[in-house]
Amino acid sequence: MKKLLSALLSLMTAVSFLHVSVPSASAELKEVTILAYVCGADLESEEGEATGDIREMISSGIGNSSAVTALIATGGSTKWHNYGISSRSVQYYRLGAKSPELIKDVGKRSMGEADTLSDFLQFGISAAPAKRYILVLWDHGGGPVYGLCNDANYRDDSLSLSELRSGLEKGLGGVKLDIIGFDCCLMNCVDLCADLYGIADNAVLSQELVNGTGLNYDAWIKPIVDDPALSTQKIAMAMAETYVEENARGRNASTATMSVIAMDKMPAVMDAANAFSSALSSLMKTNAAAVIRLRAGLTSFGEFADYDASDLVDLEDMCDAFSALLPQECEELKKAARQAVCYNCTTNDIASYAHGLSFFMPYETVRSDGKEILSHYNTEDSAYASLAVTMASQTTMGGYSFSASNYTPYSFYTCDDYYAGGACSGALCDIWDGYYGDYWSFNDMYGYCGGDIWAGLDSASGSVWNGYSTSSGIWDGYGGASASSAGAETTATGIWAGLNEPVATPEPASASTALGNIWAGLLNTGADYYQPGEENQNVQEGVSEAVPAETVLEEASSYFATATLSAQMIYSVQLNKTDLDHLSTASGVLSVQKGDEVIRLGDLGKTTVDWSTGLIFSMFDGSWPMLGGQMVRAEFLYGDEAGNVRFVIPARINGLKMYLLGNHTAEGKTELLGATQGYDENGFAIRGYIALDAGMTIYPLFTAVGADGSEREYTGDAITVSQDGLQLTWSRIPSGSYLYCFGLADLSGQVHYTDSIAISF
C-alpha cells in the first residue's frame, strides 16, 4: 500500500511539474496565438531543419511578447539536433526568449494521426486563448494523395486529407483559424482548400516544392510581435512574400511559390471545378485522345526527369488549355479561382505558369501510384473526384504498340554553317524555295536554298509543270473537261477526272466525297487528315496540305531567331492515321553510340505535332547544357513563350542519386539553381536544394539501351566542383557522330522510340 501511495505521489509530482506553465482558464486573452505542429521526420534527423525553424521563431522576439505567444508540438523524428527535444515522444513547448520551454510530454504518439493533431489544438487554445489563431503544419507534403506530416517513428504514417479535416474540426471545437499555413511541399490544391472552408479564413500554401529552410519565420513573426494589431491579410501576405524573397536570394536561389487563398471563396471554386470535371469526364468518353494530349502539355508541379510528379497542375493554365473544348466551364472556373487567390508570389522562373491555385489531374504519377489515387478518390463523392478516377483509369490502361520500325526521321531542314554563309538543304528547302522567296528564308538564306518547284511554269518543260504550255504531261486531259450542266457526264481525263462533277449544295456529310479522283475532299472545309498515297487527300491547298511548311516556318523562325550557334536543323517523321490517333506527345531524342549500346543524351526540347497531317518535326540549333565542359542528360520540364527553358539533370553526387536543376533564360543566361534528391520511397518530395560545395564529385547519369532493347543506368565521367563553383553553360555540342530519333508517347504515357538516323557535327 505504501509503495502504491508513493508511486501515486511521484506521478502527481511529475504531472504537476509538466503543467507548471499552463495558465488558468481565466488567463487574459492574447492578441495572437501561433500554433506550430512540427513533425520533424528525416528533415530534422538528417539536416536539423525543424530546429532551425524553431530558432527562427525564437529570434523574432516572440518569447518576450505579452500579446503574442507561440506553442509548438514536436515529434515524428528519430533525432532532434537541439533544445533537448525528445525523439521518443510528442512534446508541447512554449517558445521563450532564448529557447523552447517544455510544458507537456504526451508520450509516444504518431503525428500522422488525426487525434494527435486534435489534442494539440485543444491544448493550445486552452493554454493560450487569443483573439486570433494561426496554425502552421510543418513537414513533408505529398499533395492530395499522400497528405502530409509523415512520422518517421511510425513507418512514415501521415495525415491524409480526411484525417487532416477530422483532426482540425475536433481540435478546434468550433473555433475558426484566422490563418492556416502549410510549410510543406505541394499542398496547394482545390480539394484541400475546399476542405478548409469553415475551418480557417485564409490558407497559405505552395503549389511547388518547398525549400528545406521553409517559411522565413523571423521575417513574418517579428512584425506581429512589433504590432500585434497587424491585419490578418498583411500577416498572410508576409508569410508568402518573405518565403519567396528568401528563396530568390543568393548563389543557390531556388524556385519558389506561395499563395494566400480565401476560404470563403472556395465553395464557388468547388462548384465550378465540379462543373468543369463533369464536362471533361463526358469528353473522355467520346474524345479521350484530345483530353490526354492537352493534359500532357501541362506542367506538373514538383516534376523530375525519371520520377513521378505530383500530377498537380496550375488551374489557370489548365483552363487555358481546355478552353477550346469547354469554353464556358473553363471561364467560370478561372473566374472563381481568381476570386479565391488573394495573393500569389513566385520567383521569376515559374511566374508564367504558377497563378496561385492547383488542380489534381492524373497523368504521370498513375503508372506507379494508380492504386493510391483510386483508393483516395473512390471514397470522395464529387465530380472532381470522379474525374481523377476516370483519368487515372485511362492512363493505367495497357500501352499501344506504334509502328516504330516503319518510322525513320528525315532531314526537313539543315543549315550546317548559318553565320558563315554555308548551304542549307532538306525537304523544306526543296519544296518551298521559290514559293515564299526571300520571305520564306530563315533570316534571308534564300540564296543558299535550291529546288524551285515553280521553275518551268511558263515553258514547255521544267519541274512538275512540264507540258503546261503544250497541254501535255500532267496537264493531259485538262482541256477535255466539258461538263457544263448539272447531271452531265464529265469528259476530263487523267488526274483531272471528276473536276467538273456537279456538286449542287451537297450535305456536309457527303461534301468530302462529292468530287472524284484526287479532288475528293475539295469541298471539305474541315481539317482532314493527310496520308500520302491514300484517298481523300484534301489537296485544295496544294502542297501545303501535304507538308504544312507555313506552320513549320512560323515555329522555326521564332525558335531560330534566338539561336546563337551555327548548326540549325529540323528533323521530321510522318505518322500514319492509326498511330496518330494513339499519340499523346512526341519528342526529339539525341543519342550517341558507345560500343554495343546507345546512350540517350536527352530530349531536344522543341517538338511540334501537326495533328491534322501526322507530321512531327523537332528543331535543334546544336546547343546543349554542358556541365564542366561535359554533355549532360537534359530533361526539359517547361519552356514558356518568352523562350525561358527549365530542365533537370540526373546525377550522382557524392554517391547519392540527385537532380541538378537548371534554367536557361530567353536572354541567353544559363543558371544552375542547385541540387535536390527528388522524392523518397513514400512519394514525398525531399525538401530544399543542396549547395554544391568545392570538392564534391558529380557523375552525370544517362540511360543506356542495349541491342536487345534492355535499359540500364549509365554513368558519365566524373566532374569535380572547384573552389569557384560549377559552371553550367548552354553551348555547342562537341564535334562527332550522333543518333537522332523520336520518342512517341501513347495515350497511357508509355514512350516508344522510332528508328534512328546518324547525324554529325
Image: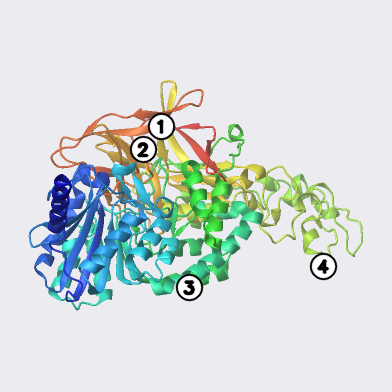
Q: CA distance from mark 4 to mark 1?
A: 58 Å
**For mark 2, does the 10 Å Cα neighbourhood hold few (<14), some (14 to 19), or many (20 or more) residues?**
many
- Identify the amino acid type marked 1: Thr
- Cβ atoms at labels 4 and 3 below 8 Å apart: no
Indicate which disc, 2 or 1, sits on the residue closer to the N terminus: 2
Q: CA distance from mark 2 to mark 1?
A: 9 Å
- Identify the amino acid type marked 2: Arg
Residue at 47% in and 35% down: 740
- The mark lying in front, picked from 1 and 3, is 3
Residue where numbered disc 2 is placed? 633
Residue where numbered disc 4 is placed? 505
Please, what secondary structure does the residue beneath circle 2 have? Answer: loop
- Cβ atoms at labels 3 and 2 below 8 Å apart: no
Which residue is at the front of the view, 268 or 464?
268
Colouring scheme applied when the structure was drawn: rainbow
- Identify the amino acid type marked 4: Thr
Horizontal and vertical percent for residue 348? 30, 60
Residue where numbered disc 3 is placed? 268
Residue where numbered disc 1 is placed? 703
- Cβ atoms at labels 2 and 1 below 8 Å apart: yes
Residue at 46% in and 55% down: 298
